[in-house]
Amino acid sequence: MTPEGLTALADVATNANPFPGLRPFEFGESHLYFGRDGQSDQLIRKLASTRFVAVVGTSGSGKSSLVRAGLLPDLFGGFMSSAGSHWRVCLMRPSNDPLGNLARALCATEVFGSDIEENAQIQTAITEATLRRGSLGLVEAVRQNRQPSNESLLVVVDQFEELFRFARVSASEQYRYEAAAFVKLLLEAARQREHSIYVVLTMRSDFLGDCAQFWDLPEAINEGQYL
């Protein structure tokens, strides 16, 4: 998602009320989001060194606001010098279809998608099939969509704990398999260095123990955790 697309998400809220209430601040409300510059700086340094960051905190502690109104404007402002200021931002929530939702988010018009609906539907189907092909599916999807060499991709997974919540209530082994595949995609994309891909999660702290369900996730969380 481009800066223009991110700003459009907040247009209604910005024109109505400078105080968002229970919802998080959005990209276009960064001028209203102040007092956490130091946190944004720390988050950028962590992301630059690990490429995988988990913003962890209690419910309502401002995790999403820190990412959307703190981190994203700084990235587009070029504050991560190693990656430059050209970013595409893929915003998603896992819900009950993490792989499908990731494919749809990647194929949004503001990321890699087409303005033509029929083409977008085909592209989304191809991207989802690529994601399901193996642990490097996200890297391959970026390659297929021809990300320019001077651009970086940031995948933001908001409310990552939905993976655990849906796994608890679902009797489907297929969902558990897809959740594990989704985690592998994120970890492998952050580890490789062929393409400039970064991953940020927001997660409630009371779900930290659930990370042990997925191979390598606890180690990645420990290394890239931001509280």
Image (spheres, rainbow, N blue to C red):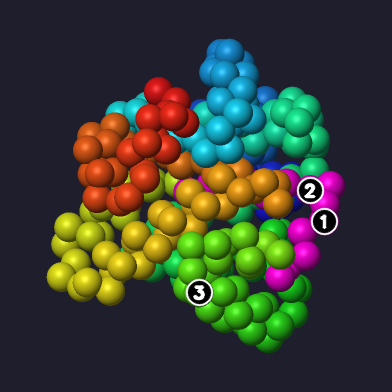
Q: Secondary structure at mark 2?
A: loop
The boundaries of the magenta stretch are 144-157
Left or right of 116? Residue 104 is left
Q: Secondary structure at mark 3?
A: loop
Q: Which residue is mark 1?
A: 148
Residue 40 is drawn in which quadrant?
A: top right
Label number found at residue 151: 2
Q: Give the amino acid at mark 1.
A: Pro
Q: Secondary structure at mark 1?
A: loop
Instruction: Tell me whether the residue at label 2 lies in contact with that at label 1, contact meaning CB atoms closer than 8 angstroms.
Output: yes
Residue at screen point 55% across, 62% down:
136
Q: Which residue is mark 3?
A: 133
Left or right of 127? Residue 149 is right
Q: Give the amino acid at mark 2.
A: Glu
Instruction: Tell me whether the residue at label 2 lies in contact with that at label 3, contact meaning CB atoms closer than 8 angstroms.
Output: no
Disc 1 from disc 3: Cα separation: 23 Å
Q: Give the amino acid at mark 3.
A: Arg
**Residue 60 appears at what percent x and percent y?**
35, 31
